[in-house]
Amino acid sequence: MGDMRISGTMSMRAATAAAAALFLLTACGDGGGGDDGGAKGGDHGRQALRSGAPAPDPTRIPDVGDRLQSRIPVQSRQVVAVYGKGVNSADATVVLYTKQGKEWERTRSWAAHNGKRGWTTSHHEGDKRSPVGVYTLSDAGGVLPDPGARLPYTSSGSFAAPHYWPKSHWTDFDYVIAIDYNRVKGTSPLDPTRPEGQSKGGSIWLHRDHGSGTSACVSLSKSGMEYLLKNLDPKLHPVVVMGDKAHLAA
């Protein structure tokens, strides 16, 4: 889906966020992963050897073309790449890359899902497609207590999915990482502010998977979310590069 740490007493901002929570959750919930422990979706070097193709350039994120590659900030040393299966597919693979020196190393990967209708380069509210692009990752939160996140983490019951949703969705927002699409950085993922306007959609998150496509978010296993929360480091300027294969490669 699509500020401050929660203190002993709820602030005015937290109260406002709680009141807006139900509105926000609709951006990533109402539709419909496993953790492959790094076994899938990223061993591009071995694939290249098997196919006879040239080995990939280790100074670039694999299978990402110049258009999006150039949008990765030079200071970023962590990239969460979301490789969508196809423009109209909800299936994806999430791969975490970490930069060592000048080279990107594949750290972990997980099976994942994106918007139930696939991907778009012009996301709007309710289209059920995930936005293609490069976005920073600044804030996190969820229903569950902070698991040791390095990103600022807001723990609140206001993240909970409504219980009129299918039961398989009730744990979707145990953990979330806000994707900085049409949102204010440095605020809780529950902050409803959309700087580019409501029609452009928002509340696009990385969150726990329920086994099928989302309304626009990217979902992966609980263990995958825990790993990202514990390892994404603001000092390394993490970003997400996301899209279907064709748009990523452009």
Image: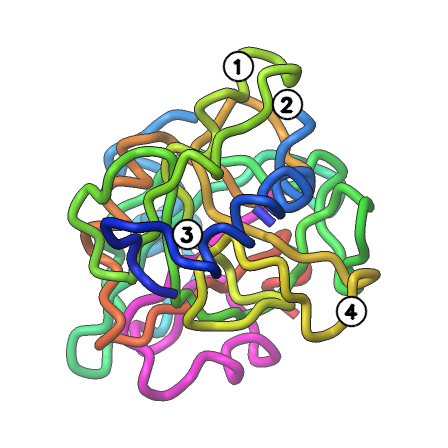
Kind of residue sitting beneath label 4:
Gly
For marks 1 and 3, give the CA distance: 20 Å
Q: Do the residues labelled 1 and 2 touch (CB within 8 Å)?
A: yes
Is 233 displayed left or right of 216 in the figure?
left
Q: Which numbered disc, 1 or 3, marks the residue that appears first in the sequence?
A: 1
Is residue 67 found inside the magenta-colored segment of the image? yes
Q: Residue 177 carries which label?
A: 3
Crowding at label 2, few (<14), some or many (≥20) Cα neighbours within 10 Å?
some
The residue that mark 4 highlights is 197
The residue that mark 2 highlights is 32
* Numbered label tally: 4
Kind of residue sitting beneath label 2:
Gly
Q: Give the range drawn in magenta.
A: 58-85
Q: Residue placed at 24% from the left, 34% from the top?
A: 37
Is residue 146 found inside the magenta-colored segment of the image? no
For marks 2 and 3, give the CA distance: 19 Å
Question: Residue 1: x percent and y percent?
Answer: 57, 46
